[in-house]
Image (cartoon, rainbow, N blue to C red):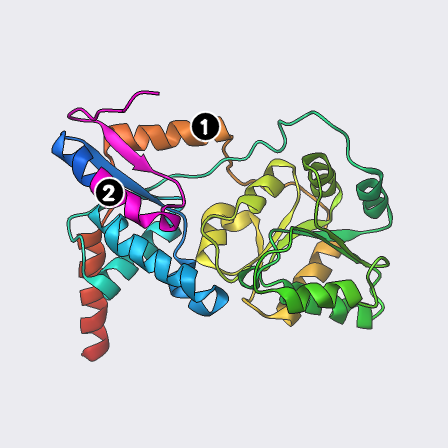
Amino acid sequence: MGKIEARPGDILLLLDAGWNNVDNYPQAISAFREKGGAVVAGVYDLFPVLYPTLYGPELVIAFETWLSEVVSRSDAVVAISRSSAKRYAEYAMMRYKWCSSQKIGWWRLGANLLAETSGEPTAAAIEIAAQGPFFLCVGTIEARKGYPVALEAFERLWAENIDVNLVIVGRPGWNAQAFEQRLRQHEEKGRRLFWLDDASDADLRHLYRETRAAVFTAFAEGFGLPLVEAAQCGAPIIASDIPQFHELGGSDVRYFNLLDSASLADALMQALSDEKRPPCVATLTWRESTIELIGLLRSGAYQMEVSAISRDIATAGLATTT
């Protein structure tokens, strides 16, 4: 493959995990700009700098370096949600005071889980779904997903002899070994508590379709892809009361108080008594998501400017001091 030469009007889109190879970027960015090209950085979330105790120090340092050496030097930023875009703009201005002219946009991710027709669910997934009413949690086992809140809510129901199952689908993540051990040793494991750490797409589709509701307990999300998958498969949705889930789910999602297992237990009981109906949540396929991103880049119609966020921050600061 030959070397790619930039031309005026070209766009270099940085969508990879660039914090792993920061040294490779500054020279490439400068060379691209010298040829008249523009550089756009993709931002998924800011979790390593917003919640550094959840990650190793090496990742936190690498991520901060990537923000200051790569993202700050980009002409524009595209985030995977409006919430993430706003959080990035606020962080950039409050922490670094950089890029007052930088433009920021966002686009929505897609999901094709429903369109995938190959394969059948495993016997294990079919058996779990057939054992009785169950709720489904989907996502990597990591601290920000709030899984302990889900488990505590179900322990409340089990203590009241409510016969309902909790099914968790997600691979082991990071800094969650204690909770993983709790799952493996739980007295309800294999009875009313099930953890599938290697489920197939067919398994997941089947579980989404059969669950009373998909439950999302995260306290921080960049986008919330499983919520989109759940909606595409027709699963009712219960989610923590955070801006990202409101952005995706709107008024057709049942929300519970953040990190409040009692509030979640109440929402679960309501879902058990209500008639099950698919949510009206707007979703995209991956093809549609790609078209939306390319349209944003080509039009340059970015929805936000850091300068506007800076004015909002200044106004908020003035309001709190008067």
Q: Does the magenta stretch include residue 24?
A: yes
Q: Position of residue 42 (x, y in %)?
A: 34, 43
Q: Position of residue 321 (x, y in %)?
A: 20, 79
Decide which of 121, 15 is in the foreground and name it: 15
Compared to residue 226, the image places residue 60 above or below, namely: below
Q: Point out the tag, 1 or 2, that comes first from the N-terminus.
A: 2
Residue under label 2? 76
Residue under label 1? 288
Q: Position of residue 17 (x, y in %)?
A: 40, 45
Residue 265 in view: no
Q: Does the magenta stretch include residue 185?
A: no
Instruction: Specify the amino acid type for callout 1.
Output: Glu
Mark in front: 1 vs 2? 2
Q: What stretch is highlighted in magenta?
A: 1-28
Residue placed furthest toward the bottom: 322
Q: Position of residue 105 (x, y in %)?
A: 30, 42
